[in-house]
Amino acid sequence: MPVTSLLGDRTLAELVEHLGNVDLQRIRVEPAPGLARPRDVQRIREREKRLFELVDGVLVEKVMGFRESLVALAIARLIGAFVSRLNLGVVAGADGMMRLLDDTVRIPDVAFIAWAKLPGGKVPDHAVPNVCPSLAVEVLSAGNTVTEMRRKRAEYFEAGVEIVWEIDIEDRYLTAYTQSEEPDRYEAHDVVTCSVLPGFVLPLEEVFEELDRHA
């Protein structure tokens, strides 16, 4: 079945592969693949309360479960407290939509944006601002694929992101990526540092403890 759009003539299988082998159910067909724009991301968020990323003009639903959100929130609290105390910039959560490139909108689970990367050094007014985080954090969900995340990292680095953290909550480790160096893997009992946040430390044990809390 051909899909005719700005992407050209592709089969559905080719489109899925192009997007990183994501589940077909995550791909929205209205607007047609290749014809979506950042305003569509905003419209769906406002009207349907659903989050879609924009990849080459294609709307791909963002997947995130309850456990992933607990870990993301724990990281956002720790980074946010550090950033606020030193007034280094802003920290966005799992619904912070960002236009990284002309036809790309991504929604990191946590993002630190330094003041220098924000127009005028202030919080933007637009719902989908054209900003690029210094640090993007992705808490992996069961629906994320290896090729999807590889593509997302490439887009982050192309846009100017300096560091990407990917967190596996099942095996409990964090992988830190940069564009020019081999990734570093941190296990559950390690403490993570970050070059874009000098002096900040992330105790992974404290983060993963969120998954073990009980009454």
Image (cartoon, rainbow, N blue to C red):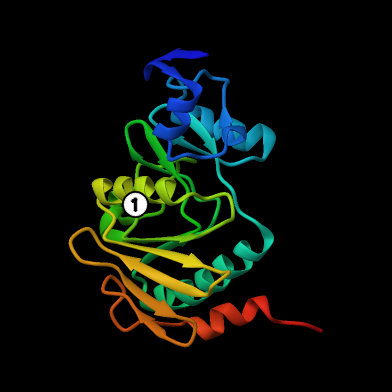
> Residue 124: in sight, yes or no?
no
Against 125, is 77 above or below? Answer: below
The quadrant of the image that shows the C terminus is: bottom right
- Disc 1 designates what residue? 153
Against 196, is 199 above or below? Answer: below
Q: Quadrant of residue 186?
A: bottom left
| Residue shown at the point (52%, 59%) measured from the top left | 140
Is disc 1 surrounded by few (<14), some (14 to 19) or many (20+) residues within 10 Å? many
| Residue shown at the point (47%, 23%) measured from the top left | 36
Against 68, is 156 above or below? Answer: above
Viewer-proximal residue, 37 or 61? 61
| Residue shown at the point (30%, 56%) measured from the top left | 121
Position in image of residue 191 (x %, y %)? 41, 85
Viewer-proximal residue, 9 or 45? 9
User: Which element type, helix, strand or loop, lies under badge 1?
Assistant: helix
Q: Amino acid at mark 1?
A: Arg
Q: Is residue 68 left or right of residue 11?
A: right
Position in image of residue 177 (x %, y %)? 31, 64
Q: Residue furthest right?
A: 215
Position in image of residue 104 (x %, y %)? 38, 36
> Residue 31: in sight, yes or no?
yes
Against 137, is 86 above or below? Answer: below
